[in-house]
Image: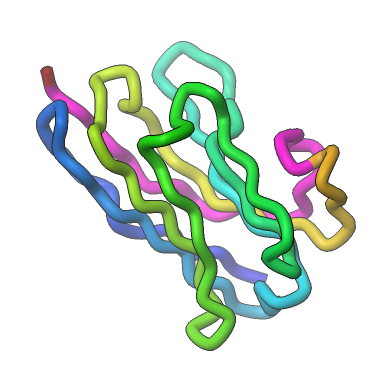
Amino acid sequence: VQLQASGGGLVQAGDHLSLSCLASGLSVRRYTTGWFRQAPGKEREFVAAVKWDGGSIAYADSVKGRFIVSKDNVKNTVNLRMNSLKPEDTAVYYCAAGGRIISSTMKRDEAYDYWGQGTEVTVSS
């Protein structure tokens, strides 16, 4: 199983950026997929996730209304559209997939089985 995240970069506050995570070895039709991030000196935190059946989507309060998570069952990707970026969004963003996640555990990193290598997002003020 591989999760290949891409799309990170350096942007200014207020800009937008789109991340994509290509899954191989598993199908996003059957796995709940999500995004987490880790800022320098901080613990990894949940960002957004979409349940395998698309029936539930969760966001961290800090990104709600600005970020949009989606998945493409044909391309086997999970995507994160980040709007109105803030300097505090600066972090390495990781995609993750889990096969036994229910709605109540979507925000918990220990619920995910597979992790990508991360893509760095830097937002300048």
Question: Is 125 drawn above or below residue 6 in the view shown?
Answer: above
> Which range of residues does the magenta coloring cover?
106-124
- x, y (%) of residue 24? 60, 78
- x, y (%) of residue 31? 75, 66
Quarter of the figure with the C terminus? top left
- x, y (%) of residue 4? 47, 64
- x, y (%) of residue 109? 72, 36
Question: Is 125 drawn above or below residue 106 in the view shown?
Answer: above
In this image, 20 relative to 46: left or right? left
- The quadrant holding residue 25 is bottom right
The residue at the point 10 percent across, 31 percent down is 12
**Outermost residue, top direction?**
41
Does residue 38 show up magenta in the picture? Answer: no
- The quadrant holding residue 55 is bottom right
**What colour scheme was applied to this rendering of the protein?**
rainbow
The foreground one among 8 and 31 is 31
The residue at the point 56 percent across, 42 percent down is 48
Question: Is 57 drawn above or below residue 28 in the view shown?
Answer: above
The residue at the point 50 percent across, 14 percent down is 42
In this image, 109 relative to 43: left or right? right
In this image, 29 relative to 117: left or right? right
